[in-house]
């Protein structure tokens, strides 16, 4: 044993120095005092008017001390419990959870190969895959239920499709405040009441402002409801650098931080102590193609920098990874998804969403979900770092085997090779074996695995009585909106 | 403009696997191993050299006391420069801690034919093709051949490869050879390109690659070539391909101790011969797949070991030869893309100096220049992260945020016009909207890589015309002499029988 030994138990990574984070923070405060943000919601404007903020029309400007006060009240730990009863999702500094994105309008039909509108079944299939694949920690809907009876209530149907397929904790989108309330009520039924939900939340509500610095009615409505009921929620800007945010990464971070801080003050005014999570899809507008890029390296860099800021603020972070601009699951998809998975993991963001997105967030692909299972596994293996205790340094063994020796037959190898990553889909056979087995590409293997899971995997079913009660909430909503 | 004091910035991201204490442990493990376990050196001249410096020897075994190792480490140069032969400063290599150059790798027996896409033996024409393609790629900082030529006189693949490559790229190349004679021929060709022996010493234009054998063995030719390079101040790599669970321990820390120790033998020899000569260590660090018994080039452990090894090697004050962009799959596909993406980004974050094997498929048995072209794009992306986030008044854009205001947009701001040019522009990654992509023929990444590569092969001429006539003649002469040498050697062999 040696004294005073400091060991890295994992990789360490950061983009910004503390001084740089402070600079960005000061600039965001400057934006809030000088420029402010627009809010299109009466109650929220009232809350600000009754505070030390300055309200002119829809424009709200906020003094720094209000931000600093609000920041003191946000929890640094949130633990979610899926309907499987496991408190499996621990949101706290530098713990990383991976999950899908949500609401993709299109899907590749696995039978016809054609692109078509996403349906209830597609969402349910994605749910089952996410439940089956071990590296997914939470589930967002992946696709949008496009065949719901009414677009005003699609979120409740979507939640049912998700719940029936997946027992893990979730991140949910909602149509409006009323929709969010229904999703919350359904979740309270599952968790055993409002109080239990508060300590064992099933989901986090996904809410987003409109960059730059605009907060529309439904977003604020959801935010205030979440504050009131203490529903964990993320207020997550999707700025596109060069269009809805400055073309510089630092400028984009300043603006999206100002957007986040405005929400922290608002929620604090409504009900101190709500579990608010910081977030963002911070990427750029491709100026040539006019598309919002999910594969740009700037997304990786800006997201990791944003996570640095969140950790400095003691806020939990909802980040982005495993996504691509490629239209299909090809070499581009693999390269881009691996890259942003890698940096989002290294950065230590808490919830990394959009895993499996292709076609810059318009197309759902079940194969992509399956491929990312392998990539997340590889990234996590990398993140384990290097063990340098005596057993792993193995100096005695090195001496014993000596120059020119071998290690294949040693007990030490037998004991430790199990620490290595075991691929599920990567091919490591030799050329002849590979030929003999049909010269399969990764795409072939991903397809086979996807089909196998779809044919065979069934999640733990929902209790029939509970299911009836859940359905009643959905039916009631449909009736109200018919 | 607000001026700030006590202000430290992270100009590029901070990435680290090992703590200082952990690096010290691996370093001490290396010191202990070289002192008490020692290494086998199958070269009498080298053993004499070590003995004279204070090492104990026992048969082929050499035991290196700490003072010999520390003395060698005290003379390794902190900075070395390597120059393109045409004087193009933009392609100059600065060998210095945390500065990365990526390139292909040496010597696989097979090559993916660029016309038929079938795997076949590597041919002489492939060497100049690879050199030319890499010359055109923006992110290939140095060049290796991606193969071992099968269709020239036996024993001269190394010399022909060098002759063809150096004339088809100005990007500095990294060569290998069977024996001392090969590097001697290459050295003479490099001198011809540099315009004289003194000029070469001042402005070396290639790097030599040699390897010890794990665990802890330097065979005759490896150390003999290493000594030749040191004598002539040729920057060189001396690094093993260590196989975790096969030729080194299955635990990563143990693997790094062995890999570091065996490389250090070359460092010590080179520094004893010529203090201050450039030696780069590192090598391929990966594991033996226990199911298929292959040396995995796509395992996440390769990325992890290589990045950690980079830290250990830099801790010793030496430059690092690392690995990325390679795969276990047989040809470029989705698997090779994801494996390459992981290893390239990891290598970039580690700050390794030379990162090789970009373009290896089939676990290092096949060279695939299409994979190299794909890797080049991924390296470009990783460079964006390497550059970090610039934080200052202009980039934080508080003025512009205020001018645009809530609900506005930035499309026509001068600030946007100026700064969006800094955004990375893909050459292969598709960012079309779906409809445009369909209209353009639903091309996959593979289609685009094939197109780009073949376009370079057919239309990019490379620097062949710029090669000075005298150098050309000299190289042809050296090739003829090397043929004579082999003829003579095989004649001698026949006589000895």
Image (cartoon, helix red, strand yellow):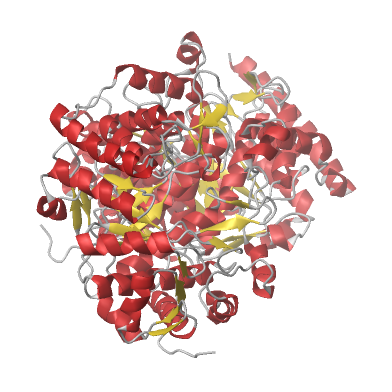
Quadrant occupied by the N terminus of chain B? bottom right
Q: How many marks?
A: 0
**Can you tell which quarter of the image residue B460 is in?**
top right
Along the line of sight, the residue nearer the viewer: A311 or B83 = A311
Q: Residue at x 59, y 75 (%)?
A: B404
User: Residue B46, percent across and down?
Assistant: 45, 45
Q: Residue at x 41, y 29 (%)?
A: A122
Q: Residue at x 15, y 33 (%)?
A: A466
- Asked whether, in this view, residue B283 is left or right of residue A160, the answer is right
Quadrant occupied by the C terminus of chain B? top right
Q: Is residue B331 visible?
A: yes
- Asked whether, in this view, residue A444 is left or right of residue B131, the answer is left
User: Residue A454, percent across and down?
Assistant: 35, 21
In this rendering, is residue A228 above or below B251? below
User: Residue A18, percent across and down?
Assistant: 37, 75
Query: Which residue ends up furthest to the top in the rendered image?
Result: A436
Along the line of sight, the residue nearer the viewer: A113 or A4 = A113
Q: Is residue B301 visible?
A: no
User: Residue A174, percent across and down?
Assistant: 36, 49
Along the line of sight, the residue nearer the viewer: A191 or A410 = A191
In this rendering, is residue A212 above or below A119? below
In this rendering, is residue A209 above or below B381? below
- Asked whether, in this view, residue A432 is left or right of residue A139, the answer is right
- Asked whether, in this view, residue B44 is left or right of residue A275, the answer is right
């Amino acid at each position: 044993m040696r004294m005073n030994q400091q060991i890295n138990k994992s990789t360490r990574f950061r983009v910004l120095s503390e001084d740089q984070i402070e600079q960005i923070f000061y600039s965001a405060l400057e934006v809030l005092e000088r420029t402010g943000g627009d809010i299109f919601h009466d109650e929220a404007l009232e809350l600000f008017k009754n505070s030390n903020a300055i309200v002119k029309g829809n424009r709200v400007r906020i003094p720094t001390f209000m931000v600093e006060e609000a920041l003191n009240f946000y929890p640094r730990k949130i633990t979610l419990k899926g309907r499987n009863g496991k408190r499996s999702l621990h949101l706290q500094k530098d713990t990383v959870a991976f999950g899908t994105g949500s609401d993709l309008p299109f899907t590749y039909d696995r039978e016809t190969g054609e692109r078509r509108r996403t349906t209830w079944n597609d969402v349910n299939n994605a749910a089952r895959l996410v439940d089956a694949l071990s590296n997914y920690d939470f589930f967002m809907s992946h696709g949008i239920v496009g065949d719901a009876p009414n677009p005003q209530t699609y979120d409740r149907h979507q939640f049912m499709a998700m719940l029936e397929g997946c027992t893990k904790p979730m991140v949910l989108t909602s149509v409006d405040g009323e929709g969010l309330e229904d999703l919350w009520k359904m979740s309270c039924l599952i968790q055993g009441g409002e109080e239990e939900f508060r300590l064992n939340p099933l989901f986090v509500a996904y809410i987003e402002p409109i960059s730059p610095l605009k907060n529309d009615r439904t977003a604020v409505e959801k935010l205030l409801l979440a504050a009131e009921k203490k529903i964990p929620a993320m207020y997550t800007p999707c700025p596109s650098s060069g269009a809805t945010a400055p073309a510089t990464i630092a400028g984009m971070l300043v603006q999206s931080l100002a957007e986040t801080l405005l929400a922290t003050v608002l929620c604090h005014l409504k009900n101190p102590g709500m579990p608010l999570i910081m977030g963002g899809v911070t990427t750029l507008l491709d100026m040539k193609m006019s598309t919002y890029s999910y594969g740009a390296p700037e997304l990786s860099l800006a997201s990791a920098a944003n996570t640095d800021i969140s950790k400095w603020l003691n806020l939990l972070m909802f980040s982005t990874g495993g996504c691509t601009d490629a239209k299909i699951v090809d070499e581009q998809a693999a390269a881009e998804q691996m890259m942003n998975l890698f940096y989002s993991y290294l950065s230590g963001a808490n919830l990394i969403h959009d895993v499996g997105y292709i076609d810059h967030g318009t197309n759902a692909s079940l194969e992509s979900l399956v491929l990312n299972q392998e990539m997340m596994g590889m990234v996590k293996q990398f993140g384990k770092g290097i063990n340098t205790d005596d057993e792993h340094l193995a100096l005695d063994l090195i001496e014993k085997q000596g120059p020119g020796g071998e290690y294949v037959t040693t007990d030490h190898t037998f004991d430790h090779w199990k620490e290595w990553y075991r691929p599920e889909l990567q091919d490591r056979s030799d050329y002849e074996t590979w030929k003999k087995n049909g010269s399969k590409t990764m795409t072939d293997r991903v397809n086979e695995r996807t089909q196998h899971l779809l044919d065979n995997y069934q999640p733990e079913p929902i209790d029939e009585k509970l299911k009836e009660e859940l359905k009643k909430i959905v039916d009631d909503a449909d009736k109200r909106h018919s | 403009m607000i001026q700030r004091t006590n202000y430290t910035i992270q100009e590029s991201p901070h990435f680290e696997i090992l703590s200082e204490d952990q690096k010290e442990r691996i370093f001490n493990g290396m010191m202990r191993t070289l002192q008490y376990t020692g290494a086998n050196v199958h070269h009498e001249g080298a053993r004499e050299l070590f003995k004279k410096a204070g090492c104990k020897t026992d048969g082929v075994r050499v035991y290196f006391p700490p003072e010999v190792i520390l003395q060698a480490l005290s003379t390794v140069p902190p900075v070395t420069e390597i120059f393109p032969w045409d004087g193009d400063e933009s392609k100059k290599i600065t060998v210095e801690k945390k500065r990365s150059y990526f390139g292909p790798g040496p010597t696989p027996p097979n090559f993916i034919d660029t016309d038929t896409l079938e795997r076949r033996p590597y041919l002489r024409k492939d060497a100049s093709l690879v050199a030319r393609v890499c010359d055109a790629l923006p992110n290939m900082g140095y060049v290796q051949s991606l193969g071992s030529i099968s269709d020239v006189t036996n024993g001269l693949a190394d010399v022909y490869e060098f002759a063809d490559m150096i004339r088809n790229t100005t990007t500095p190349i990294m060569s290998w050879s069977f024996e001392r004679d090969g590097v001697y021929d290459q050295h003479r060709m490099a001198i011809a390109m540099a315009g004289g022996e003194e000029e070469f010493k001042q402005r070396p234009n290639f790097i030599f690659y040699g390897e010890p054998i794990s665990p802890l063995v330097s065979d005759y030719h490896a150390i003999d070539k290493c000594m030749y390079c040191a004598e002539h101040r040729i920057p060189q790599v001396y690094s093993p391909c260590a196989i975790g669970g096969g030729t080194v321990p299955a635990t990563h820390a143990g693997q790094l101790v062995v890999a570091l120790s065996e490389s250090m033998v070359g460092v010590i020899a080179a520094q004893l011969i010529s203090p201050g000569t450039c030696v780069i260590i590192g090598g391929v660090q990966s594991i033996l797949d226990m199911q298929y018994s292959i040396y995995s080039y796509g395992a996440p452990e390769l990325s992890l070991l290589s990045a950690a090894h980079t830290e250990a090697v830099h801790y010793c004050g030496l430059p690092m030869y690392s690995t990325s962009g390679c795969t276990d799959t047989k040809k470029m596909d989705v698997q090779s893309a994801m494996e390459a993406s992981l290893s390239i980004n990891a290598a970039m974050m580690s700050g390794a100096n030379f990162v090789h094997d970009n373009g290896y498929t089939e676990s290092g048995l096949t060279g695939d220049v299409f994979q190299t072209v794909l890797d080049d794009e991924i390296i470009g992306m990783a460079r964006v992260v390497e550059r970090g986030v610039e934080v200052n008044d202009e980039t934080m854009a508080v003025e512009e945020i205020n001018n645009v205001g809530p609900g506005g947009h930035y499309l026509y701001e001068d600030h946007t016009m100026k700064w969006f040019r800094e955004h990375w522009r893909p050459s292969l990654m598709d960012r079309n909207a779906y409809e445009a992509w369909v209209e353009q023929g639903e091309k996959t990444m593979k289609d685009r890589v094939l197109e780009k590569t073949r376009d370079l092969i057919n239309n990019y001429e490379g620097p062949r015309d710029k090669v000075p006539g005298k150098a050309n003649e000299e190289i042809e002469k050296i090739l003829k002499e090397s043929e004579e040498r082999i003829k003579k050697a095989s004649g001698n062999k026949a006589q000895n029988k």
